[in-house]
Image (cartoon, rainbow, N blue to C red):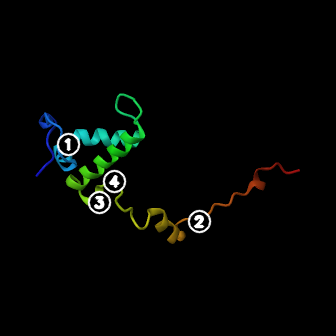
């Protein structure tokens, strides 16, 4: 099963359920909703109402649950350890540089 293509998205009727709505969403619609939630604005620049933002986010989450691998979904767990922590553990590679500021002063 795959998401419908954009030219297939013409329900011609009101969906009976969220499942039916999500099943009929195209990747383009998903991307537009996701971007609108991220930016707080529709593509034409009109600001989303709080209700629109909540409903759009719900649709994004439901779409991802149906079509997106778990590790790529909104709210997927982050890595347990970040790269900067690995650098902190190996401090031997990084040594502070001590500048001799007195050597630049003129001698009296």
The residue depicted at 75 percent of the width and 54 percent of the height is: 101
Return the residue nearer the eye: 56 or 31: 56
Question: Dot 4, how many residues are within 10 Å of its Cα: few (below 14), some (14-19), or many (20+)?
Answer: some
Is the residue marked by circle 2 packed among few (<14), some (14-19), or many (20+) residues within 10 Å? Answer: few
Dot 3 alpha-carbon crowd within 10 angstroms: few under 14, some 14 to 19, many 20 or more: few
Q: Which mark is residue 105?
A: none
Distance between mark 2 and mark 4 Cα atoms: 39 Å
Q: CA distance from mark 4 to mark 1?
A: 17 Å
Dot in front, 4 or 3: 4
C-alpha separation, residue under disc 2 versus residue under disc 3 = 37 Å
Residue on which disc 2 sits: 95
Q: Position of residue 14 (x, y in %)?
A: 18, 38
Q: Quadrant of residue 91?
A: bottom right
**Which callout, 4 or 1, points at the residue further toward the start of the chain?**
1
Which residue corresponds to mark 1?
A: 25
Q: Which residue is mark 4?
A: 74
3D distance between C-alphas at marks 4 and 3: 9 Å
- Chain-order first, disc 2 or disc 3: 3
Q: Secondary structure at mark 1?
A: loop
Q: Secondary structure at mark 3?
A: helix
Q: Which residue is mark 3?
A: 71
Tag 3 near tag 1, CB within 8 Å: no
Please report contact status of discs 1 and 2: CB closer than 8 Å, yes or no.
no
The image shows residue 106, relative to residue 14, as above or below, that is below
Viewer-nearest of labels 4 and 1? Answer: 1
| Secondary structure category for the residue under label 4 | loop
Of the two numbered discs 3 and 1 in the rendering, the one whose residue sits closer to the viewer: 1
Mark 2 or 3, closer to the camera: 3
Whether the residues at callouts 4 and 3 have beta carbons within 8 Å, the answer is no
- Residue 87 is left or right of residue 30, and the answer is right
């Amino acid at each position: 099963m795959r998401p419908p293509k954009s030219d297939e998205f013409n329900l011609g009727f009101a969906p009976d359920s969220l499942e039916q709505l999500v099943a009929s969403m195209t990747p383009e619609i998903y991307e537009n909703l996701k971007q609108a939630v991220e930016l707080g604005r529709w593509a034409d620049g009109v600001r989303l109402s709080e209700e629109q933002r909540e409903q759009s986010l719900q649709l994004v989450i439901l779409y991802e649950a149906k079509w997106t691998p778990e590790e790529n979904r909104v709210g997927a767990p982050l890595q347990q350890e970040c790269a900067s922590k690995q650098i902190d553990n190996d401090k031997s590679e990084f040594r502070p540089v001590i500048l001799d500021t007195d050597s630049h002063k003129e001698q009296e």
